[in-house]
Amino acid sequence: MDRVNDAGAEAVEEGERGWDGGKARLFFGLLGAVIGLDVVTKLAVRRTFQLYEHVDIIGEYVRITYIHNPGAAFGIEVGPYSRVIFLVLSVVALAALAGMYWITPARDRVRLAAIALICGGAIGNLIDRVRSARGVVDFLDVGVGDLRWPVFNVADIAVTTGAIFLALSLW
């Protein structure tokens, strides 16, 4: 519970703002897990599959299809400068999310987890964009027959899930 000081202003509990305490453990633990899982799965796909190769995992419904995506999540592209645009947008978004983390109280664990998921996914894809001009490695392919969702990766799942939970936490 928040304390009120003599002037009537709300006092901030230790670890409520900034990088300290359980707040940081939750955030950086989840952030590291997302980045680690994203990097390891992309590395495994690059080492195991040929570009454009696909393997059915659950019939035709779930496949691993190795592609490079120069655009954003789920194949969104903005032309020949996609790499630079998405590099800059990623850094700006990460800065904004760092600010949001800073002001989020430690007790708002859903919002902290959401921010960590988004940051972890953004960093995972940022690593790929810096590493290769071909874009990020995507490999998760779901659908039925020719009706397929754009191929995506662990980072895309983290960003999407985090964005949903962030929106719900702000509602």
Image (spheres, rainbow, N blue to C red):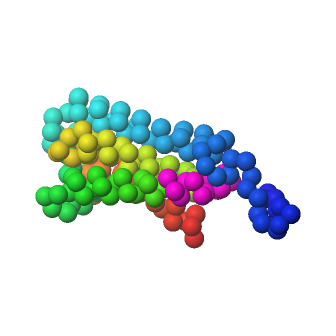
Q: Is residue 9 visible?
A: yes
User: Which residue reaches farthest top?
Assistant: 47
Residue found 55% across the figure and 50% down from its top: 113
The answer to which image quadrant residue 77 occupies is bottom left
Q: x, y percentage for residue 3?
A: 81, 59
Q: How many marks?
A: 0
When the figure is inspected, residue 56 is found, relative to residue 1, above or below; the finding is: above
From the top left corner, tell me how far across and down residue 115 is, in percent.
51, 53
Q: Is residue 148 visible?
A: no
| Residue drawn at 47 percent across, 49 percent down | 117
Residue furthest to the right in view is: 6
In the image shown, does 10 or 97 lie closer to the viewer? 10
Quarter holding the C terminus is bottom right
Q: Give 11 or 100, whichever is nearer the viewer.
A: 11
Going 64% across and 42% down the picture, which residue do you hit? 20
Where does the image place residue 7, in percent across and percent down from the top left? 83, 67
Residue 116 forms part of the magenta stretch: no
Residue at x 36%, y 52% (from the top left corner):
91
**x, y percentage for residue 16?**
68, 52
As displayed, is residue 126 above or below residue 146? Answer: above
Q: Main secondary structure of the magenta part?
A: helix
Whether residue 166 sits left or right of residue 51 in the image: it is right
Q: Which residues are magenta?
A: 98-110
Left or right, 98 with reference to 52: right
Residue at the outermost bottom position:
171
In the shown orientation, is residue 157 left or right of residue 57? right
Q: What is the quadrant of residue 1 in the picture?
A: bottom right
